[in-house]
């Protein structure tokens, strides 16, 4: 919810939807995909 407000403010400031989309994809990657990938590699090593 908080990140949505930041993206909305960023869009209103710059009026650049492509930058908003890229930021959203980057945050989702770091917050969802990367931890999942790291947890799978740690389980396979142990």
Image (cartoon, rainbow, N blue to C red):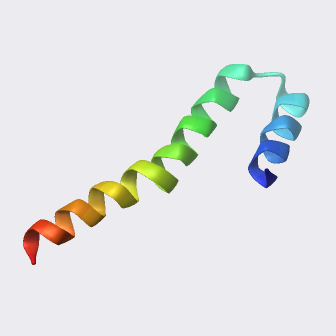
Q: What residue lies at 28% left-to-right and 62% top-to-bottom? A: 38
Q: Residue at x 85, y 36 (%)?
A: 8
* Residue 26 x/y as whole percent: 52, 42
User: Is 19 located above or below residue 34 in the figure?
Assistant: above
Residue 24 at x, y percent in the picture: 62, 38
Q: How many marks?
A: 0
Q: Could you tell me which residue is drawn at 88 percent across and 39 percent down? A: 9
Q: Is residue 44 left or right of residue 31?
A: left
Above or below, comparing residue 43 to residue 15 in the picture: below
Outermost left residue: 45
Residue at the image position 40 percent from the left and 49 percent from the top: 33
User: If the image is split into quadrants, where does the C terminus sit?
Assistant: bottom left
The percent coordinates of residue 13 (x first, y second) are 89, 33
Using the rendered view, name the quadrant where residue 35 is placed. Answer: bottom left
Give left or right: position of 43 versus 37: left
Quarter occupied by residue 5? top right
Image height of 36 relative to 19, above or below: below
**Residue 17 pos. (x, y %):** 73, 21
């Amino acid at each position: 919810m908080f990140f949505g407000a930041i993206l909305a403010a960023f869009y209103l400031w710059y009026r650049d939807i492509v930058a908003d989309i890229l930021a959203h994809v980057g945050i989702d990657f770091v917050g969802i995909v990367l931890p999942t990938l790291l947890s799978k590699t740690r389980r396979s090593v142990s």
